[in-house]
Image: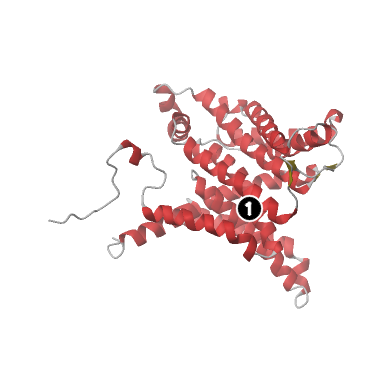
Amino acid sequence: MSTITTGVYSRTYRQDFLLRRTWLERARLALVLLAIAVAPFLLSVYWLEVATQIAIAAIGAIGLNILVGFTGQISLGQGGFLAVGAFTAGLTAIHTGLNPLAGVALAGVVGAVVGGFFGLPALRLKGLYLAIATLASQVIITWSIIHLSFLGAAEPLAIVEPATVFGWTVSGTWEWFWVIAAFAAVAAVLATNLFRTGVGRAFVAIRDQDIAAEAVGVNVAGYKILAFALSSAFAGVAGALTAYRDTFLTWESFTFEISILYLAMIIVGGLGSVSGAIYGAAFIIGLQAFLQELGGNLQGSFPSVQENLPAIQQIIFGLTIVLFLIFEPRGLARIWQRSKDYLRLWPFRY
């Protein structure tokens, strides 16, 4: 007598801990890796540059989602933590002979320390009050970069020497795409596995109900600071990669608008989802790039479009966030999940 499988079930603990439990999930992952591998051969220089920016943004968005989506805290200072990582890497490259990998690691550590410090208000504050406290971190970091002379960053920083790792000089759009895509993949894997550990489950418990979490033995204060530190460490790495890739740094690249942009990424992509942070980064950065290219193409026929392009971008940006909050608060990750469920259950979708 034949048996019919009605779901995905695990027979061993090893099967239960697999990230990809079905052949379809593994096939989708293989297709994604294949798409990344062939992207440099299919995309134009402009869109390959956009893809590189998406990979950097994905790292920072994953870090912010750890804090906001998984731990239930709020941060309006992600742009400042990106600046901490960028200027740490920039000053390291200019004043020391450290390997760029060491510079990226140092940027992550410094970002974690700074993020943990500015996370201290989370021990007493919640909601809007915590949002204002994290906004202060953005202002303080920007002020420090501009006015503290020992940082040497009041004027734009220029990294003269290109990034060289084990004799390989990383230069050009192709090379940087591979490097940054690899960092983004590592960040996604680390974040995904984080929430398979006790630390990640403690973060989620704090998000769901911090009083109940403390009642069952979770060190709420310690884990809140750890969440801020981990989030800022990811932002520090993203900022360091930006510094080594651009070789030119100014504080104006890490303003409050950047913090809002990253918050929009995780809202559109989906709070509490690692894949959602990647989807959100791709959607927001890709939308901006598409509007920029469209404005350039229409410049000859409709000059007013090019002139008003920044305003048009802001309108579309705000409208996108509002529409997602109204119609799909859980973002692109939820839309993708519902699509998979529909196809998996079809034709019995009820």
Instruction: From this view, report whether residue 209 is shown above or below residue 40.
Output: above
Q: In this view, which residue lies farthest toward the front?
A: 167
Question: Splitting the image into 4 quarters, where does residue 76 fall?
Answer: top right
Q: Is residue 265 visible?
A: yes
Question: Can see residue 249?
Answer: no
In front: 174, or 50? 174
Quarter of the image with the C terminus in it: bottom left
Outermost residue, bottom side: 301
Left or right of 290 in this view: 327: left
Relative side of 249 to 14, left or right: right
> Which x, y percent locates residue 149?
87, 30
Q: Which residue is mark 1?
A: 54
**Relative image position of residue 337 (x, y in whole percent):** 42, 54
Which residue: 65% across, 48% down? 180
On the image, the x and y values in percent for residue 95 come to 83, 32
Name the amino acid type tagged 1: Ile
- From the top left corner, tell me how far across and down residue 36 is, in percent: 57, 56
Residue drawn at (45%, 53%), measured in percent from left and top?
334
Left or right of residue 170: residue 8? left
Quadrant location of the N terminus? Answer: bottom left
Q: Residue at x 79, y 36 (%)?
A: 93
For disc 1, the neighbor class at 10 Å (few under 14, some 14 to 19, many from 20) is many
Q: Is residue 208 above or below residue 58?
A: above
175, 340: nearer the viewer: 175
Taking the image as shown, residue 181 lies to the left or right of residue 165, namely left
Which of the 4 quarters of the picture holds residue 208? top left
